[in-house]
Image (cartoon, grey):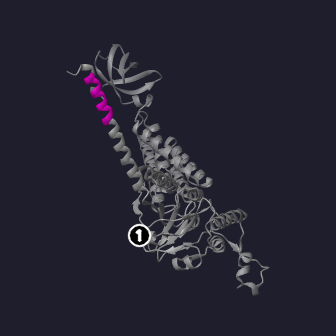
């Protein structure tokens, strides 16, 4: 018979063998998954303004594509433009991506305007759907300056007006020195991107200086886009075998058998997108302020203070990632202080109305209306104005009621009050009124426990009469 020790060793080796088989199967499955991922193109969506939220989503999407071994990243884009800082972050991620990135301006009617033009130039492959456009990449000033007032060069020769070689030299210069720096920086950036991927640098400069635009077919003819495609499938078919610059070296695209995988924005991106919306940021700050004010007016309520504190912090976080105008922020702060002053020093609405006007005016100036995605929402500002006015009117109404109300404190409140006689001797004694013991006198003899009414006060002595003799 087999000994107990031998049977134990046999069970032990069986378990080891099963674990080894399981690990082997797991490794094969993992390798199969990796091999399968290598055969897909990861599609990212940029629909709307370029913002910190979209930049975070695209950058993490590029990292995910590298980790999953994707063969191509397709950035499907329809944008009016957006923030310069977010655009630079996206371009930096594209230029350093180990996976080639193809920007696809789609569907028909979409555009790659302003910041979208820079992203398209930074991509390894630029594709446009029929009926789309690219260009208008002139930067605008943040903080109010309006548009770009160009000034023609008076020294330019009119005979050279149609000479393409002199067009760059004759490009008008903006009158604002700050915008001169911004435009020159943008020109240098787009020309650098054009040189990396062999695109039309001169047209890129015109898109920045003169807000030039191109249709899809014209962009291909001008060497701004590589080709046009109706959909993602046609893009993969036409991209196969093309040579792109990847990390400074030629890279041949192999897209013949790639499957299409969509990467939707996760909850983090969606939350950041909501918070980073200028109107939401303004609402959060206003709600936070009013929540704290209501908590101060009603100590111990807890709920307004908690919601207000969270909202105020989220609003400040939103401002930290959005470009804002200090003058607009100062006006909003002044308006909130005026509303707060109305709450603690009622002026029957004067301070509150002034505060509402300051808040709305600050909201108009807080974000630049010419930057896509940062336009102030008139309905949102109207809602804030109505809320502020409603709060001020409520405070004014409460102040008016208090002003008209009968006095309920001090010696004046004792006149007409009912009291109870505690002890009495001749024409004087003590009465109990409003929880206090007072000296009292009357023209009549009173009994202990008798109800009396206070008719007057002389120093610290109350004048009382019996209730059955009142009137």
Residue 11 belongs to magenta span: yes
Q: In the image as oriented, which residue stretches furthest toward the top? A: 425
Nearer-the-camera pick, 378 or 116: 116
Residue 21's x, y, as percent?
33, 40
Q: Is residue 352 magenta?
A: no
Q: Nearer the viewer, residue 98 or 3?
A: 3
Q: Nearer the viewer, residue 43 or 139?
A: 43
Task: Name the quadrant of the N terminus.
Answer: top left
Dominant SS of magenta comes to helix
Residue under numbered circle 1 = 233
Residue reaching furthest to the front: 1
| Nearer-the-camera pick, 277 or 248 | 248
Q: Position of residue 258 (x, y in %)?
A: 42, 63
Magenta-tinted stretch: 6-18
Confirm whether residue 236 shows in the render: yes
Question: What is the x, y in percent for residue 211?
Answer: 61, 73
């Amino acid at each position: 018979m087999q000994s107990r020790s031998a049977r134990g060793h046999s069970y032990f080796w069986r378990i080891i063998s099963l674990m080894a088989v399981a690990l082997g199967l797991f490794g094969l499955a993992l390798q199969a998954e990796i091999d399968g991922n290598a055969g897909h193109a990861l599609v990212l969506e940029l629909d709307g303004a370029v913002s910190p939220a979209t930049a975070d989503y695209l950058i993490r999407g590029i990292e995910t594509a590298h980790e999953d071994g994707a063969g191509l990243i397709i950035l499907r884009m329809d944008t009016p433009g957006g923030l310069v800082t977010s655009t630079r972050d996206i371009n930096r991620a594209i230029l350093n991506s180990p996976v080639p990135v193809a920007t696809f301006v789609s569907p028909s009617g979409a555009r790659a305007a302003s910041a979208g033009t820079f992203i398209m130039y930074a991509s390894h492959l630029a594709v446009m759907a029929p009926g789309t456009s690219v260009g208008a990449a002139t930067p605008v000033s943040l903080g109010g300056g309006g548009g770009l007032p160009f000034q023609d060069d008076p020294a330019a020769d009119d005979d050279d007006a149609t000479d393409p070689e002199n067009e760059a030299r004759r490009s008008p210069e903006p009158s604002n020195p700050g915008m001169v720096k911004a435009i020159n920086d943008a020109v240098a950036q787009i020309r650098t991107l054009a040189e990396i991927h062999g695109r039309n640098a001169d047209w890129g400069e015109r898109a920045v200086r003169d807000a030039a635009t191109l249709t899809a077919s014209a962009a291909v003819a001008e060497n701004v886009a590589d080709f046009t495609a109706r959909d993602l499938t046609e893009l993969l078919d036409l991209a196969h075998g093309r040579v792109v610059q990847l990390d400074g070296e030629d890279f041949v695209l192999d897209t013949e058998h790639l499957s299409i995988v969509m990467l939707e924005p996760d909850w983090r991106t969606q939350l950041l997108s909501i918070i980073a919306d200028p109107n939401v940021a303004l609402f959060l700050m206003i709600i936070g302020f009013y929540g704290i004010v209501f908590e101060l007016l009603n100590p111990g309520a807890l709920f307004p203070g908690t919601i207000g504190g969270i909202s105020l912090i989220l609003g400040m976080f939103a401002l930290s990632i959005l470009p804002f105008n200090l003058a607009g922020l100062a006006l909003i702060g002044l308006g909130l202080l005026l509303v707060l002053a109305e709450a603690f020093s009622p002026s029957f609405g004067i301070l509150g109305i002034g505060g509402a006007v300051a808040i709305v005016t600050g909201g108009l100036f807080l974000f630049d209306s010419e930057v896509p995605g940062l336009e102030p929402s008139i309905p949102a500002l109207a809602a804030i104005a109505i809320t502020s006015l409603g709060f001020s009117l409520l405070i004014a109404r409460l102040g008016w009621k208090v002003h008209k109300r009968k006095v309920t404190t001090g010696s004046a409140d004792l006149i007409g009050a009912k009291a109870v006689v505690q002890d009495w001797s001749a024409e004087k004694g003590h009465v109990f009124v409003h929880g206090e013991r007072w000296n009292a006198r009357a023209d009549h003899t009173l009994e202990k426990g008798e109800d009396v009414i206070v008719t007057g006060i002389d120093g610290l002595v109350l004048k009382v009469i019996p209730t059955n003799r009142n009137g």
